[in-house]
Structures are given as C-alpha cells and as structure tokens.
Amino acid sequence: MTDSSLSLAPPGPASDGAVEALPPPRRRSLLKRILANGSVRAGGGVLVLLVLIALAAPWLGTIDPTAIDPGSSNILPGTRGEFNSLAGDTFEHLFVMGTDSLGRDIWSRTLYGARVSLTVGIAVAALAVVFGMLVGLLGGYFRRIDSAVMRLMDGVMAIPGILFAISLVALFGGKLLTVVVAIAVPEIPRVARLVRSVVLTVREEPYVEAAIALDTPTWKILVRHILPNAIAPLIIQATYVCASAILVEAILSFLGVGLPADMATWGNIMAEGRAQFNQFPHNVLFPGIFLALTVLAVNILGDGLRDTLDPKFNKRGG
C-alpha cells in the first residue's frame, strides 16, 4: 500500500486534493439584530400602534375633544346617546369611554391627548439629546473647560426637575413650547454626563491620538471618530428621557401647572375626574391606562435597544 492511498483529501473535482477554505460566517446587519430582539418588537409595536391611533383620531369615531354638553355629563362607558353642541347641533354618538362632569367625550379626549403626550416625549428627548451631546462632546474633549462645564451641569441637576418645570411654566405660561423646555432642561445634564464618559474613554484610543498627531481638524475628530461611539448610548438614553417626559407632563397637567385645562391631555383628563373618582372611575381609569401603556412600551423598547446595542449586555455579539 502506497502513501498516496492514505490521502485524507475529500473527494471532489480538485485535482490537487486541497481542502477549500469555508467562507467566514456573515454577521447580521444591525437592523436585523435590533428587530430580532423581542423587547424591541413588543415596545416598538405598541408605540407604532399608539402613533397610528393618535394620527387617525379624527376617523376613529371621535368628536371635538373640547366640546361641552352639560346634559351628557358623567355618562357611563359604552352608552349610546345624543350629544348637543353649544352651536345647537344634535347628533347621536357612542360614548365608548363615557363622559366627564362637563359632558366631554373621554374617548375623544384620550385619543387626542395621545398626540400631546407623544409630541412632548419626542420633543423633549430630541432637545435633551442634541444639547446634552454638544455639552458632553465639548466637556469631554477639551479638558480646559471640562471642569467648568461639568460643575454647571451638576448645578442644574441639583434643582428638582418638577420644581424647575413649575417655576418656568408659572413665569412664561402653560404653552406647549414652555412645557417642553421646562422638562428638557433638567434632562440635559444626564445626557451630557453620559456622552462625556464615552468621550473620555474614546479620546485615549490610538486612532484618535494618531488623528491628533496628523493635525486633523478638531471637528473632524469629534464627528468621525468620537461621535459614532456615542450614538448607541444616546439612542438608548433618548428612550428613557422620552418616557420620563411623558410622565412628567402628565404630572404637571394633573397638578394644574402644565398645559391649559381645556387642552386634551391625559393629565388634564385625570385631574378633571379625580373629584368624582369613587362614583365615575372611568374618567381616570382610561387615560391612566393609555399613559401607563405608553411609558411601559417606551421603557421596554429602551431595554431592548440596550440589550442589542450595548456590548456589555449583547453577549452573543450578533
């Protein structure tokens, strides 16, 4: 028996008997890894449904959320009756969630209130992320101003967010822009400290030091080398800021120091119904369910994004 008969080369058309190398496993794209997370699908799906409901509110059997009919006050959920507007129009309407003490339709006010809450949450998250990112980048990269900037952020964090929002609304009135700014300002230091911690770590990496040694413009180093490393933590933090903003806006409206009482917001609806909660709990129950569901969905989405984007939690690495 010759040595050639002991060859372990696999059968195939190759004449030299060489084993072909297997291609490396293909890593899943970032979007596929995100969508593969159950928390992202659950939280994102609920949020998409709430957004669609808010946008389609005029076509979901609603009426003017500010319309008042004293003759239709405190109607129980699921009751069909007549609604008399102040303009003298009378029409039949199904009160899906009942009415409040002023005869306003809770179903209509709850759906239109979703627009306000989602707008506040998204706007606050955007403002806090943009300004917090700028402050964190500058403070973490330029050590000369780091101490002064961070002490300023510490001073802002020392002010209770609710008291700051109440003071700002009392000074400038209960406008939507005022409420958004009042809620966003206390969130900026938290985002700034997060970005700063990332910058302090990344700026010591060899490729950043090499870019500095090559006299690369500072803005290019920040945008091309440092900022991409902070995108994932920023996205995760934005979801928690959004959930907190929705909750704080409802608290301010419930206390009567947020948006005007005639505006349909979940906090205003619950504030109107708390006086008669024992007799007519639906005035507080339905907007409270929508509020809790929205905040829960945003937090679940944030947890899913954290598990996918943060390497500390993403053990499988895609």
Image: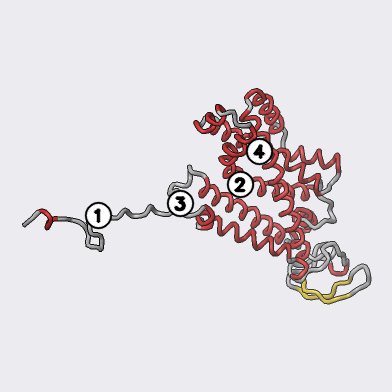
Image quadrant assignment for residue 46: bottom right
Residue drawn at x 39%, y 54% is 25
In the picture as drawn, the residue positioned furthest to the front comes out as 15
Residue under label 3, please give it: 318
Residue type at mark 2 is Ile
Q: Residue at x 70, y 64 (%)?
A: 53
Residue at the disc numbered 2 = 235
- Residue that protrudes farthest toward the top in the picture: 144
User: Alpha-carbon neighbours of circle 3 within 10 Å: few (<14), some, or many (≥20)?
Assistant: some
Nearer the observer, disc 3 or disc 1?
1
Q: Hey, what amino acid is under mark 1?
A: Ala
Q: Mark 4 or mark 2: name the one nearer the start of the chain.
A: 4
Left of 276 or right of it: where is 192? left
Q: Earlier in the sequence, mark 4 or mark 1?
A: 1
User: In which quadrant is the N terminus drawn?
Assistant: bottom left
Q: Secondary structure at mark 4?
A: helix
Between disc 3 and disc 4, whose residue precedes?
A: 4
Cα gap from disc 3 to disc 1, whole angstroms: 32 Å
Give the number of the disc on residue 232.
Answer: none
Residue nearest the observer in this picture, 257 or 58: 58
Q: Secondary structure at mark 3?
A: loop
* Residue where numbered disc 4 is placed: 133
Q: Pointer 4 and pointer 1: residues touching (CB < 8 Å)?
A: no
Instruction: Tell me whether circle 2 and circle 1 mark residues in contact (CB < 8 Å).
Output: no
Which one is closest to the eye, mark 2 or mark 1? 1
Tag 3 near tag 4, CB within 8 Å: no
Distance from label 3 to label 2 (Cα)? Answer: 19 Å
Question: Label for residue 18?
Answer: 1
What distance separates the C-alpha of mark 3 from that of mark 4? 27 Å
